[in-house]
Amino acid sequence: MDKKIKNIGHLKGKVLLFGGVYSNLQALEELKSISESLGIPAENCICTGDIVGYCAQPEETVQLFKLWGARSIAGNVELQLAEGAEDCGCDFRKGSRCDGFSQQWYPYAQSQLTKNSLEFIATLPDHITFEFAGKKIMVVHGSYFNTSEFIFKSTPWENKKPNFSVSNSEVIIAGHCGLPFHHQHENLLWLNPGVIGMPANDGTSKVWYAIMDDSNGNLNFEHHRLDYNYELANKLMQNGLLPEAYARTIVTGIWDNTEILPDVESGLQGLEINL
């Protein structure tokens, strides 16, 4: 299948980057408010995919995203929903706890989304490309080659490098793995802003996003924590239809398990992230 790649041209000023909204309406509302307070236009706000996911308000989240006018690529969840697939396509190991949980939250999300929201989801491109501060940038979900590929800070550079070559990019903005990080090698940058729908396994309810700016003609970026009404998000998830473990994670900041994590990241569970 040919990839849908959307070129959005040259961006200037500040660019807000985030991923994994995961049906967390409260986190999206807070991030939208921050973007507006900073004067970042909606067209400069870019999501790495998985607008829909583990939390309680998939329909409301998609509709707010549409109303905001921010940009997004399709995560694996959007691709599966658009196709009417029976699973989330997250590439969890069959029979794992994450796989079992997906059999709760994914059908719930499917049941909540209207035709209008599904039609919007189907319009999302596989990748977004743009130029910023003299750099060619591509937005991917997992990787250019596999939407569901888990790539972390500890993933060898040799695994990341082909993404730059095939996309003719100097910066890759990625999502999917749920953890914020950046990895620079010579003149190339892999930047994962993190996700806003779930904590980063660091023992805090705060979630993560990033902001790029082009001051002095250079590409600069900073990772930021987002504090939002996690108590309401947690309460709404306790509806008997969604995994209780994910509702707890919203509050504790600790993942139920570390099945998807490499040894390095697994060993950092509960520790403060300094970026």
Image (cartoon, helix red, strand yellow):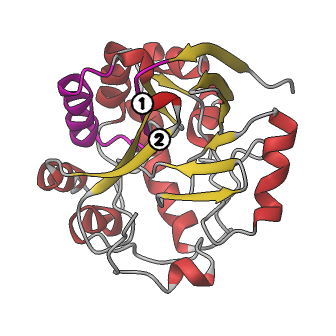
> Where is mark 2, residue-wise?
220
Query: Which residue is painted at 60% across and 45% down in the image?
Result: 174
Q: Residue 202: horizontal and vertical position, in percent? A: 34, 73
Tell me, for residue 32, which label it has, or none.
Answer: none
256 or 11, nearer to the observer:
11
- Residue at left offset 73%, top offset 21%: 5
Residue 51 picture location, percent across and down:
45, 36
> Does residue 145 appear anywhere in the picture?
no
What's the distance in space between the residues labelled 2 and 1, CA to CA?
A: 7 Å
Amino acid at the residue labelled 1: Ser
Secondary structure beneath label 2: strand
- Residue found at x 72% / y 39%: 170
Instruction: Find out whether the residues at labels 2 and 1 contact each other: C-beta distance under 8 Å.
Output: yes
| Magenta stretch contains residue 236 | no
Q: Which of 25 and 93 lies nearest the eye of the viewer?
A: 25
209 to 82, vertically: above or below: below
Chain part drawn in magenta: 12-40
- Number of callouts: 2
According to the picture, the residue beneath numbered tag 1 turns out to be 215
Q: Quadrant of residue 113?
A: top left
Residues packed near mark 2 inside 10 Å, few (<14), some (14 to 19) or many (20 plus) = few
Pointer 1: residues within 10 angstroms few (<14), some, or many (20+)?
few
**Mark nearer the N terminus (2 vs 1):** 1
